[in-house]
Image: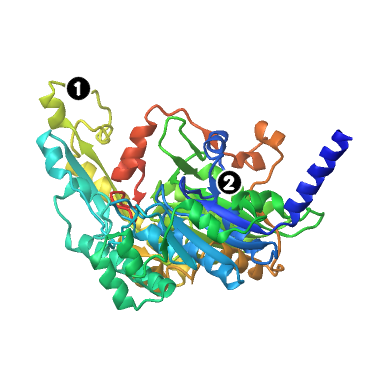
Amino acid sequence: MDATKSIMDTVERFRQRRTAPIVLELDLTEGLTEGPPADPLSALLSMRKTRLSDVLSGLRRARRDPRVKGLIVKIGGRPIGLATVQELRAAVVRFRAAGKLTVAFAETFGEFGAGTVPYYLATAFEKVYLQPSGDVGLTGVSLEQRFVKNALAKVGVDYQIGQRHEYKTAANTFTHDHMTEAHRESLTRIADSVVEQIVAGIAEGRRLAPERVRELIDGGPFLGAEAVHAGLVDRLAYRDEVYDEVRDEGDHLLFIGRYAKGVLPKKLPHPGERVVALIHGTGQIRLGRSGRSPLGGGGAMGSDTIAAAIRAARRDDAVKAIVFRVDSPGGSYVASDVVWREVVLARKAGKPVVVSMGDLAASGGYFVAMAADVIVAQPGTLTGSIGVFGGKPSLGGLLERLGITSESVDVGANSGMFSSSRAFSEQQWERVNAWLDRVYDDFVGKVAQGRGVDREQAHELARGRVWTGADAHAHGLVDELGGLEDALAIARDRAGLPKDATVRAYPRMHPLERLRPPESSEDKAAALAQVRLEAWGPLAHLAAELGLPAHGPLMLPGWWTIR
């Protein structure tokens, strides 16, 4: 009897749990991952991280789920990019519009540090709570650029770098000791555009006049009590007090990632189903396969991997449209061109290609996107940077100071031109500039072709300048402002698919298929990433932050970020 009663009690608890009101949770302490893991190591490292796509799909489904009564989000921890924040804000606003409760809770917005962007995210919620010991670091936006030219000169290092054109400032870190006029102009406009977006969002969310928000930004950061008095937060409360206020007895707490994956019934595939393929391209663009170093350095968008994925989607009769999610600062020109070509071929095959830009889609990241039917970006996306730079450091002076001598045997006038122990000769520098001209001319020509403008217009929008998504949209480099959900809706519409047509992360394979080697470059398995044993992974990451030219000629400046 006891065993029977125990089973019945378990069944009853399960039934109550399935029918109980649901309060969804999202913990952003560890940040978000952009898309599905590209390789086994990424899958392991991201096991406890929530995917942005799961959050978006979960909130979309929850809007129509009568069991879901509200959402509590803990904000803080690792920084989240501005465009990702705007994507989350839009999803929360739609969730609120369905009559659901939304609550943002933070232990602190900055803890005596920058907290403008996290607070901007919080203002999309109906209620904003702050731990009594917390602060609101609403201080605006600062884009700081460091210059190391003089420091390098002291140790005998000289950089020889050419760029196309004046706004392509990634290499200025090494070649200048101050901002050029074009450099300052570009950064000033980016900062102004970002502040405009943040002010508008906070003003709407907190029901304040924009002028008052700007006054508050100039008066920050704020202690907790000051933030309440200024109307920036609703109440000071600890986590238990927030949950006691939001939850009723019997409510079921559920992380939104679990809700998106396992609570709701999923559509079963059927023969002849028409789908939208979703392909993620994340990280620096390089030749070869996507992957990451197990020793650090982050992930990379490999041209072979992404090209194979687009090619497989193009050849799959079930795929009627492609959404290409791009989050990249750029990288190799040749690798970017490989991906660009596959986008062109997909369009020629009659399959609409819609690009959804993440936090970054600049330089090479714009190159791979510019041939799409439609480009969608958030207002805070950083894009453009249509230009090129290239060159090398000359370490001869440093080596001499260290007592290191270097000798070589050269056959060919330019055989040693890429050696870092000597400077370019006049003839070699001419070849470098001819290469830069060729790359820039090709880039701008393809921008003109993809955007439907003449070459002179494309050049004026290019010149290496970085734009926010809002400004890129105003100048025609981006077609629509929005996020991944908007891009998927556009793709379905372009392909004549129903609004609930299935989205399939591509390539979709059985786990056992992932273990076998591909039969050819036409095989879907060729689109898998790899783990690379790169001993210099941590230094590669640092170099990427510095914008070192070793990572490719199409790169976004890497010294500054928006937080």
Q: Is residue 320 left or right of residue 294?
A: right
Q: Tell me whether the residue at label 2 lies in contact with that at label 1, contact meaning CB atoms closer than 8 angstroms.
A: no
Q: Can you see residue 505?
A: no
Q: Which mark is residue 407?
A: 1
In the image shown, does 471 or 56 lie closer to the viewer?
A: 56
Q: Position of residue 204 (x, y in %)?
A: 42, 75
Give the residue type at disc 1.
Glu
Q: Quadrant of the C terminus?
A: bottom left
Q: Residue at x 46, y 42 (%)?
A: 300
Q: Residue at x 44, y 63 (%)?
A: 128
Q: Is residue 162 left or right of residue 34?
A: left
Residue ID for mark 2: 36
Q: Can you see residue 415?
A: yes
Q: Position of residue 56 (x, y in %)?
A: 58, 59
User: Going from the N terminus, do you reach mark 2 or mark 1 first?
Assistant: 2
The crowd level at tag 2 (other Cα within 10 Å; few <14, some 14-19, many 20+) is some
The crowd level at tag 1 (other Cα within 10 Å; few <14, some 14-19, many 20+) is few
Q: Which mark is residue 177?
A: none
Picture quadrant of residue 460? bottom left
Q: Position of residue 530 (x, y in %)?
A: 54, 34
In the image shown, does 157 or 426 lie closer to the viewer?
A: 157
Give the residue type at disc 2.
Pro
Picture quadrant of residue 509? top right
In the image shown, does 83 or 96 lie closer to the viewer?
A: 96
